[in-house]
Amino acid sequence: MPLEPPPSPWVFPDPALADPDDDLVGMGADLAPGTLLAAYRAGLFPMPSGGRRSPMAWFSPVRRGVLPLDGLRVSRSLRRAARDFEIRVDTAFAEVVEACADPRREGGWIDRRIATAYTQLHELGWAHSVEAWHEGRLAGGLYGVAVGGLFAGESMFHRERDASKVALIGLVDLLRDEHADRRVLDVQWQTPHLASLGVVEVERTDYLDRLAAALDVPLPGVFAFG
């Protein structure tokens, strides 16, 4: 089971009371494991606001991107492609984060502070990678944070065609259990690419209600017992 870190000394604003037109809820705090877990449990997540000395920004999107576990769209060609990959969990977490943080990626936002913080969460059993392997090579994957019935996806990457999508299929399969109807797969914001895979938008208040219910759900076995 994950190890609970010391509690955070920071108090986050209640996103339910935040500006209804602004995704940004707060600035500052730190990225200690207890702070990150408090944020996810409250419906927030961090992103750098600028350079390495800039304060951290904390978001709770007005319209949150979530992927219903029964709503993943998998084309026939993608289903065929998935047969060529092997799904593994937590065998290359650092490599997945490093690939997601590649500065050559357009719109990259994962800096050293973020990478270090989520590695610490991983070591405590809260952050996980789902990886797509092909012929013994890491071809793609994703990482995120699992708290109860919440899986908060942070980033994904691919080195081979369809590999990140295959990792997402693998994640959804892992989350489809007897508690699937109460689990929440959070992807932060909907993009055209994610929408094509079935990601929908929900209002902030709706997301917070779903989150509250999800936090009472047991972790999936693969994340609870690793």
Image (cartoon, rainbow, N blue to C red):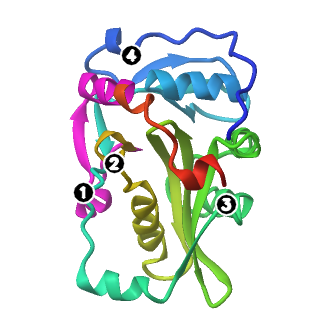
Q: Within the magenta stretch, is there residue 1?
A: no
Label 1 – label 3 distance at C-alpha: 24 Å
SS at circle 3: loop
- Circle 1 Cα neighbour tier, 10 Å, few/some/many (<14 / 14–19 / ≥20): few
Q: Nearer the viewer, mark 2 or mark 1?
A: 2
Residue type (three-letter) at the residue carrying disc 2: Ala
- Residues under numbered marks 2 and 1 in contact, where contact means CB atoms less than 8 Å apart: yes
Q: Position of residue 213 (x, y in %)?
A: 35, 27
Marker disc for residue 15: 4
Q: Position of residue 133 (x, y in %)?
A: 60, 79
The tag earlier along the polypeptide, 2 or 1, is 1
Horizontally, residue 76 falls left or right of residue 34, namely left
Label 1 – label 4 distance at C-alpha: 27 Å
Which span of residues is magenta-colored? 186-212
Residue type (three-letter) at the residue carrying disc 3: Asp
Residue linked to disc 3: 90
Marker disc for residue 70: 1
